[in-house]
Amino acid sequence: MATKQSGPIGRPRAFDTEAALERAMLFFWEHGYEGASLAGLTKAMGISTTSMYAAFGNKEELFRKALERYDEGPSAYLTRALEEPTALGVATTVLTGTVRTTTRPAQPHGCLGVQGALVTGASSSSVRDLLATWRNDGCNRLRERFQQAVDEGDLPPTTDAGLLGRYVSTLAFGIAVQAASGIGRDELQSMADAALEAWPPF
């Protein structure tokens, strides 16, 4: 004899949250935080606004999750670069990874972390600050890796690891801006190669 259920059975989500988050990341990447309306986001994600709030929280929380996905996916070349055995290898992998990631035909050009919320209204200042912290974190990781290179004798003892980290970061961010402006991969790669011809630069 069948027994009566003791409580309600939760309804499973009718959509793939990972796929929806991927589409949200691409939408934020293309339109920026303030340019991504809720209507546009939910249409791109293929879900209702109610489902978005239930699965991801509000728009800012969704953006934070999208940035984490970007960090672990398209922007993961930084982590790989830090594992290179030489400082020059680190810089080369960062700049080459930036060129490739910001110019892929099947995704938005540019960098979500650079142009996602560079300038915002007061209501979005927390997202602007989030991305500033994200960019500075990348620069600090490079500084630490270059300091390691100095300590190991891979870079001259007079090298300013902080300045070198900021230099490589600035080159990478500049590449991203140029890519978003329509500059092609070959030209950007040539610029990156030219920047690395004299290493270290100072």
Image (cartoon, rainbow, N blue to C red):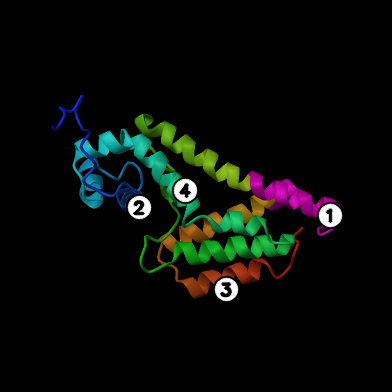
Q: CA distance from mark 4 to mark 1?
A: 31 Å
Q: Are marks 2 and 4 in contact (CB under 8 Å)?
A: no
Q: Are marks 4 and 1 in contact (CB under 8 Å)?
A: no
Q: Label 3: how many residues lie within 10 Å, few (<14), some (14-19) or many (20+)?
A: few
Up the image or down, 183 lies above or below 202; here it is below
Q: Residue furthest top?
A: 6
Residue 149 left/right relative to 174: right
**Residue under circle 2?**
22
Mark 2 lies on a secondary structure that is: helix
Q: What residue is shown at x 78% (from left), y 50% (from top)?
A: 148
Q: Is residue 160 visible?
A: no
Q: Give the x, y percent position of residue 99.
A: 51, 65
Question: Which numbered disc flags the more N-terminal residue, 1 or 2?
Answer: 2
Q: Main secondary structure of the magenta part?
A: helix
Question: Which numbered disc flags the more N-terminal residue, 4 or 1?
Answer: 4
Q: Give the x, y percent position of residue 31.
A: 32, 50
Q: Which mark is residue 190?
A: 3
Question: Which numbered disc flags the more N-terminal residue, 4 or 3?
Answer: 4
Q: What residue is shown at x 37% (from left), y 30% (from top)?
A: 122
Mark 3 lies on a secondary structure that is: helix
Q: CA distance from mark 1 to mark 2?
A: 40 Å
Question: Which numbered disc flags the more N-terminal residue, 2 or 4?
Answer: 2
Q: Is residue 154 visible?
A: yes
Q: CA distance from mark 2 to mark 4?
A: 15 Å
**Residue under circle 1?**
152
Q: Are marks 3 and 1 in contact (CB under 8 Å)?
A: no
What's under tag 2, amino acid-wise? Glu
